[in-house]
Image: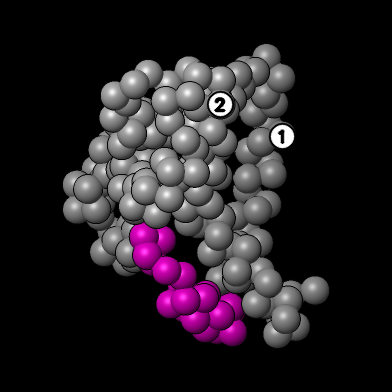
Amino acid sequence: MPYEYNDIVRHFYEELKPLFVNYLRKNFTLDYDEIMDIYTDVWIDVRNNITRDRVETGTKWKAYILKMGWNQANKIASRRHRDMDSYDDEKFNRDEFEKKYTEEKAAETSIYEDPDMQAVLAAELSYIPDPCNKILKLYYFDELSMKEIADSMNYSTSRSAITTKNRCMEKLKTRVVDAVRRLGILG
């Protein structure tokens, strides 16, 4: 066997981690945990490929590992895109949707006019780390377009910024709901 897995891991695992994380964050809308899962999977694949003699002599490990990460992240992105495209227009009931949307909007308006809710929202927003804190402030307070946010935060496309903002909003909503329940504001 031309390579020993332990030698490759010892030499490259910690050294490549920051580069790997930044590379995938720049090119895909994945959070840190997803990227670290991919990183772990890549190293499992590296081990399997080495033990099966599927790695050529002279392999450039940095490029090899980044390429494997790219492939796995691309599969995840493709799967997400496919899931979004699989929306079935035939089953969509516009009247039901509009009724539910109107009810939810009315409930949100009354909740967000409550001063206690506003205080909780402000507190929870201040605890959310970047990039979520920054992207939400740019969008909701500075009222920048998603294109402007993508440019200022170095996202590859405005779609990447939108995906990140949506994921951040879900995290913020979860934090706010947990906080208001702990405080007894919501049942």
Seen at 71% across and 34% down, the residue is 96
Note whether residue 161 is visible.
Answer: no
Q: Which residue has dot 2 on it? A: 51
Q: Is residue 82 above or below residue 135?
A: above
Image quarter (top left, top right, bottom left or bottom right) of the C terminus: bottom right
Q: Main secondary structure of the magenta part?
A: helix
Residue 107 falls left or right of residue 49: right
Amino acid under label 2?
Thr
- Tell me which corner region of the image, top left, top right, bottom left or bottom right, holds residue 186: bottom right
- Can I make out residue 139 in this image? yes
- Which region of the structure is painted magenta? 113-133
**Picture residue at 26% right of the left edge, 38% below the top:** 156
Q: What percent of the width, then of the height, locates residue 175?
A: 60, 69
Q: Is 48 situated above or below 99?
A: above
For marks 1 and 2 on the same chain, the one whose residue lies earlier in the sequence: 2
Vertical placement of residue 121 versus 100, above or below: below
The residue that mark 1 highlights is 96
Are there few (<14), some (14-19), or many (20+) residues within 10 Å of tag 1? Answer: few
Q: Nearer the viewer, residue 148 or 32?
A: 32
Q: Amino acid at mark 1?
A: Glu
**Could you tell me which secondary element the residue under label 1 belongs to?**
helix
Q: Between residue 20 and residue 172, name the one nearer to us.
A: 20
Residue 78, position in %: x, y? 49, 23
